[in-house]
Image (tube, coloured by chain):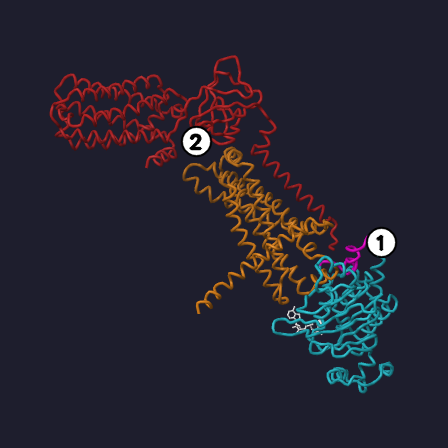
Amino acid sequence: MFDAVTKKGLTPLLGILKELGNIGIMFLQSIYWTFRRPFKLNYIFKQMEFIGVNSISVVIITGTFTGMVLALQSYYGFRKFGAEGLVGTTVALSMTRELGPVLTSLMVTGRAGSAMAAELGSMRVTEQIDALIVMALNPIKYLVVPRVIASFLMFPVLTSIANFVGIIGGYLVGVKLLGINEGAFINKIIKYLDPEDIYNGLIKAAVFGIIMSVISCYKGFYTRGGAEGVGRSTTEAVVMSSVTILVTDYVLTSLMF
Amino acid sequence: MEDTAIRIIDLHKSFGPQKVLDGINLEVETGKITVIIGKSGGGKSVLLKHIIGLLKPDSGEIWVNGNDITKLPEKELNEVRRSFGMLFQEAALFDSMDVFDNVAFPLREHTKLSDREIESVVEERLRQVGLLTFTEKMPSELSGGMRKRVGLARALVLDPDIILFDEPTSALDPIISLSILDLIRETQQRIQKTYVVISHDILGMFRIADKVAMLYGGKIIEYGTPYEIRRSTKEATKEFLKATKIPGFTGGSYEQQQDFP
Amino acid sequence: MSSSKISPELKVGILVLVSIMILFYMSFRIGRLGTFREGGYEITVTFANANGLDRRSPVQIAGVEVGKVKNIALDSYKAMLTLTIKEGVKVPVDSKIIVKAQGLLGDKYIEILPGTEKKFLAQGDRIKDVIPGIDFNEIFTQVNVAAKNFGETMGEFKDILGDKEKTNIKKSIANIESLSGDFRTFMTDNKGNITRVVNNTAVVSEKLSSIAKDIEQGKGTLGLLVKDDKLYNDAKETVTSLKNITKDIEEGKGTLGKFAKDETLYNDTKEAVSNIKEFTDGIKKGEGTLGKLVKDESLYNETEKAMKKIQKGAEGLEEITPVTILGTIFGFLF
Ligand SMILES: Nc1ncnc2c1ncn2[C@@H]1O[C@H](COP(=O)(O)OP(=O)(O)OP(=O)(O)O)[C@@H](O)[C@H]1O
Ligand SMILES: [Mg+2]
C-alpha cells in the first residue's frame, strides 16, 4: 500500500529527472558536435537569419513598448517624491538588467522555439532524422548544433537592440510626452547605468538562448506520435523553455548583481 | 567478394508486448535483388531498419562486410552505413530543401565533387526518375509518388553497395510503377549492387526479383527464387499469393507470368 | 533554399553590426570606454568610513567632475580609495579632501578642496588631509537622543525638591551656558551656513514644543523658579542666548546647502550635540536637587517665548525646504 503510494508519487518525479538528464545529454552532445569538423557554417547562418533577423520586428515592438510603459509607470511613482529624473534610470536599468533579456527571450521562444520543436518534430515523424542517420550524418550536428549556436549568438544581439529601443521608448514617453527634463533624464541614465548592467544582461540572454534552443530541439527531436505528437512537442517546448528561462533568470540575477 | 552481403541470424525484436520479429534468419546474396514480401504490419520496415542500424534488436546478429552491426559503436556503424543507400517508405525528403538539394545532399556531404559535377550527377538521376523539370520544387509541392521518385534518386546517387527500398512502388500509378521497377532492374543489372526491396506489389516484384523472402509471423518462412515461391506448398504463402486474384499465379511459373498484361 | 537576393550571411552580418554599434554607443555614453580613453593619474586617500562611495563615484573640484573613484580597498580597518584624476587637472599637495552627498537623497561623491601650494600631486601620491564626512544619519540620531534626554529632564523639573546641592544646578546651568556660548560662536562664525542645522533643529524643536506643553501643564510647580539671584540671572542669560541663536537661525534662512561645505560647522555641531548630552546627563545626575528652582514666572515665560521662536524658525525653514528632503528626514527619524 505504502509502496504503491510512494511509487505513484515518485514516478512523475523520476520522469522529470529523466527528462532533465536527457536535456543535459543533448546539451553536452551539442557542445561536443560543435567542435567537430566540418563546421556547418551555412546551416548556422540560416538559423541565425531565422532566429535573429526574422525576429527583429517583434523584438523592436516589444522592446519599445516595454520601455514606454516603464517610463509611464515609474513616472507616476516618482512624481510623488519629486524625483521624475529617475525615470530614465529606472527604464535603463530595468531594460538592460531584466526586461531586455527576459522579454526578448520569451518572445523569441514563442517564435523560434516553437518553430524548432515543430521542424524537428516533423522531421522525426516523417523519418527525415532517420534519413540523416542512414546517410551516416549525425542529426545533432546537422540539426541541433546550428540552432543552439545561432540562438546563443542571436539572443544577445536581439537583446541589445531591445535594450536600445526600450530606452528610446522610455525617452519618448518620459521627455517628449510627460515633459521630464531631458538633461536630467539622460544624465541620470549615464550616471547610474553601469556597463556591467548591459553586459550581464547580454550574458543572461546568451544563456537563455542556449536553454531555449536545447529544450526546443530536445522536445522536437524526441517527438512521438505523428502530427499530433508534433503539436504536443511544440507546446511543451515553449512552456518548458519559458519556465526554465524565468527560473534561470532568478538564479543568474542573484549570482550576478 | 563474398556471396552473402547481409547475413541475419536469429533476430528478435519486440515493441512492448508486441513481438514483431521473432527469429529472423536470412542471407541476402551479393549483387542480387532480394524482395521481401509479407503482410502489412508484419514487420518488413522494422527488419529493414535493423539492417541499417536504425533500430537495435533485442537479440540476434546482423553481419555486413564482416561486422556484426548490432554491436558496432556509432562511429564504425557510420562507416558501414556509407556503403548503404535507403529509400524510406514515405521518402523522408528534407522539407527544407528543394528537389535538387535533396538529391545533391549526400554528394555534398560525402564527396568532394565540384558544384558542376554534382549538378551533372543529380540531373542524370532526376532524368532517370523522370523529374528533371522539378528541380526547384519543394517536397511539400510534390505528390506522394513524385516524392518517392526523388527519394529513389537520392538513394541511388552515391552508388552504394547495398540499397534498401521500402516499398518503392506504393502510391505510384501503374505506368510509373512499371517504369520505376524497370529503373531498379536496369540500374541493378548495370552496377551489379545488392538490392533489398520490400513490397506488397507481388506482381511487380516478381518481375524484378532474383530471390524472394516471405516474412510471416515474425519469421522468414520461405526463401527462394520467384519460381520456387510460386511453387510453395505453404498455406501462408499460397494465401498471400492468391491475393493477387490472378488465376494460376500460385503454383504457376515465372515464365508464364510474362504473358499477363 | 529560398531564393531571396540577400543572402542569410549578409542579413545576419548587418544585424550583428547594428547591435555591436548599439553596444559601443551605449558603453561609450555611460562612460567606461570614456574613462579608458582619457586616462589620467592616480592618487590615494584613506577614509575612516567609505560608506556610500562606490567605484566610479565622481571626484569633484568646485563642483566640476575631475575624476572618479577607481578602487576601494580595506587598509588596516580603514577604507583606502584610489582616485583617477583626469590628465591636466593639477591638485596642489596641500589640498583637503572630503566626502559629500548631493542632497540628502543623493549619492556620495568626493570633493577636493584645493590648497594653495605650488607643488602638485603626481601619480601614486597620497592626500593626507582628510576631513571626516558628514553622516546625516549619525547627526540625526544624536540630536534625537539629546532631545529625548532633554525632555525627560524637563519632566523632572516638575518635582520640586529641597534646596540642597545648588552647586549641581549651577554646574548644569554652566553647562547650558557653555553650550550656548559654543552655539553662539559657531553661529556667528558660520552665519549664512546654518540652514542644515536648522533642519536638525526643526526636529529638536518639535520635541521641545512637546516639552513646553509639559511645562505648561506643570505651571503651578515649575513656573516659579528660584530666588537665588545668581542662578536666576544665569538662567535668564541662557534664555537670551537661545533667543540669539534662533535669531541667527532665522537670518540664515534660505541658505540651505552651504552647511555641507563647512567642516568647522560640522565639527561644532558635533560638539554641540555632545554638549547637550553632557548637559542633560548632568541634570540627570543632579536629580532631586532641582526642586529648589525659583518662582519667577517671567523666566518661564521667556523660556516659552524662546521655544516658540525656535519653532517659528523651523517653520520658516520648512517652507523653503523641498518636501522630499523633509520627508527623508522624517524617514530617518521615525
Ligand atoms: N517504433 C515503433 N514503436 C512501436 N511499435 C512499432 C514501431 N515501429 C513499428 N512498430 C510496430 O511494428 C509492427 C511492424 O511495423 P512495420 O512498419 O515493420 O510494418 P510493415 O511490415 O512495414 O507494414 P507496411 O507494409 O504497412 O509498411 C507494426 O505493428 C507497428 O505497430
Ligand atoms: Mg513498412
Which residue occupies the foreground of this view, C258 or A218?
Answer: A218
Q: Is residue B201 left or right of residue C315?
A: right
Observer-side mark, 2 or 1, equals 2
In this figure, which residue is indicated by the disc labeled 2?
Answer: C51
Circle 2: element type: loop
Image height of C255 relative to A60, above or below: above
Q: Position of residue C199 (x, y in %)?
A: 34, 28
Q: Which corner quadrant of the image does residue A18 belong to? A: bottom right
Image height of A13 relative to C31, above or below: below
* Magenta span of residues: B96-117
Quadrant in which the C terminus of chain C appears: top left
Q: Which mark is residue B116?
A: 1
Chain (orange): A
Q: Which corner quadrant of the image does residue C289 belong to? A: top left
Circle 1: element type: helix
Which residue occupies the foreground of this view, C274 or C254?
Answer: C274
